[in-house]
Image (spheres, helix red, strand yellow):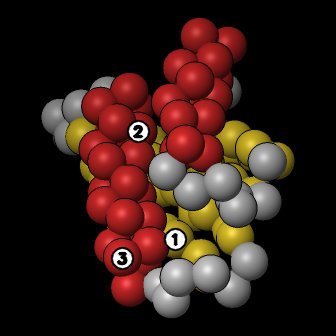
Amino acid sequence: MKLRIQSINFDATATLESYITKKVSKLEKFFDEISNIEVYLKVIRPETATNKEAEIKIAAPNVDFFASKTCDTFEEAVDLTIDALERQIKKYKEKAPKK
């Protein structure tokens, strides 16, 4: 699995990047065919209370998953985005034909 983290209009801290890496790696236990994960972190202008956006795109053979959340902190946005992706993956696996 290849992971790419992009912070747009700011520099992400090493702590934030390691947090994201740890959280995203848990997605592999739900779906082991993940080939690529892209995480985009944005600070939305103008400055408001909930201006931290996390977008995560997952690429796997024959399917892509995407989720985006905006919250007070990047950690909270990443957590909610990963929760949404877990639901998408579970739903996909239920509908996918068994091998």
| Count of numbered labels shown in the rendering | 3
| Side of 11 relative to 77 (left or right) | right
Does the residue at mark 3 contact the one at mark 1 (Cβ under 8 Å)? no
Q: Which residue is mark 2?
A: 78
The residue nearer to you, when weighing 93 against 41, is 93
Q: CA distance from mark 3 to mark 2?
A: 24 Å
Query: Callout 1: 10 Å neighbours few (<14), some, many (20+)?
Result: some
x and y, in percent, of residue 23 in the image: 50, 30
Q: Which residue is mark 1?
A: 65
Task: Name which residue type carries label 1.
Answer: Phe
Residue positioned most to the top: 15
Task: Name which residue type carries label 2.
Answer: Val
Task: Name which residue type carries label 3.
Answer: Glu
Name above or below for residue 85 compared with residue 13: below
Residue positioned most to the left: 49
Secondary structure type for disc 2: helix
- Res. 49 in view: yes
Quadrant occupied by the C terminus: bottom right
Comparing marks 3 and 2, which lies closer to the viewer? 3
Secondary structure type for disc 3: helix
Q: Which residue is mark 3?
A: 94
